[in-house]
Amino acid sequence: MGLRYIFFGGTREKNADGSKRQLGVAHNSAFEFAALNVINDYKSGNIKKIKITNAADMVKALNNNQISSVSSLDILCHGTPYSLNFSENENENCGLITGFFAKAGLAFYYSSWDDGIYSFSDDSRYVSDIDFKVFTENARIQIHGCNTARGSMPGDTLTIALSKELYQAGKTKSYVIGHTDKSNPNINGAKTTIRQQDYRHGERSIYSNGNLIHTTQISGVITHESIQNIL
């Protein structure tokens, strides 16, 4: 089945004064428990679970693989329609962005008189920086964060951008799964235990080559076989 990459975290865990940022630690903990549940549902493959530092490191890890060797990529982190939000420093994003105009728009949106200027660090990366040739023909990318497949947005959302890049790299049976709205780890509602945390619920859309092929509210695994049958 090839390599399976699972990246989790990316939320800032330190305040500007160096003290522990408890909210960030808690968010990354939820992403990790959810990652473990994703791993439990994969029945085969060489799984690489990696805590997110920044997009530069994530892209480097992916691009260092051989052509057609990565069968799946799961990323568990905070997101917007146009970005995966990683942060090591306050008001600085070192995540993955769809493109230049999205970067400029997000920097403007998150900047304020109260919080200061929001910017992207040198460790942020564009979707196009990924070498999509490393993926298999029927590769699966699943983004577990908020809004990356939100509908009726100007320009390409992150899910659409990823699916187009995969297809243009010759991965004609590939697809990308993303949430159409906010996501959360409470798959069993208020009864969800720490170990049960999982973002695979709520409305999710699936794209291939920029085209919407399916939308579902099924909880848990969207099987690879069911998507291949649609494609």
Image: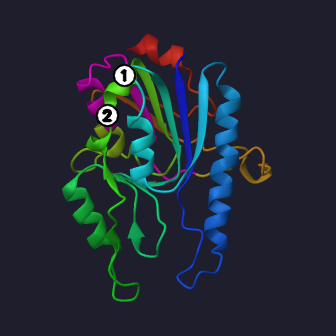
The magenta region covers 162-183
Report x, y in % for residue 219.
Answer: 63, 34
Query: Residue flagged by tag 1: what amino acid is it?
Result: Ile
Query: Residue flagged by tag 2: what amino acid is it?
Result: Asp
Drawn side of residue 192 relative to residue 180, left or right: right
Q: Label 2 vs label 1: CA separation?
A: 9 Å
Residue count near mark 1 (Cα–Cα under 10 Å), binned few <14, some 14–19, many ≥20: few
52 up-or-down from 137: above or below: below
SS label for mark 2: loop
Report x, y in % for residue 107.
Answer: 29, 69
Residue in view at x 63 percent, y 60 percent: 27
Report x, y in % for residue 1.
Answer: 55, 16
80 up-or-down from 230: above or below: below
Residue 182 or 93: which is nearer the viewer?
A: 93
Q: Residue furthest top?
A: 229
Residue 181 on the magenta segment: yes
SS label for mark 1: loop
Q: Quadrant of residue 36?
A: top right
Drawn side of residue 26 relative to residue 75, left or right: right
Residue 210 on the magenta segment: no
Q: Which residue is mark 2?
A: 131
Residue 29 visible, this orientation = yes
Q: Are marks 2 and 1 in contact (CB under 8 Å)?
A: no
Residue count near mark 2 (Cα–Cα under 10 Å), binned few <14, some 14–19, many ≥20: some
154 up-or-down from 18: above or below: above
Residue 217 or 193: which is nearer the viewer?
A: 193
Residue 200 visible, this orientation = no
Residue in view at x 39 percent, y 44 percent: 59
Residue 67, label in figure: 1
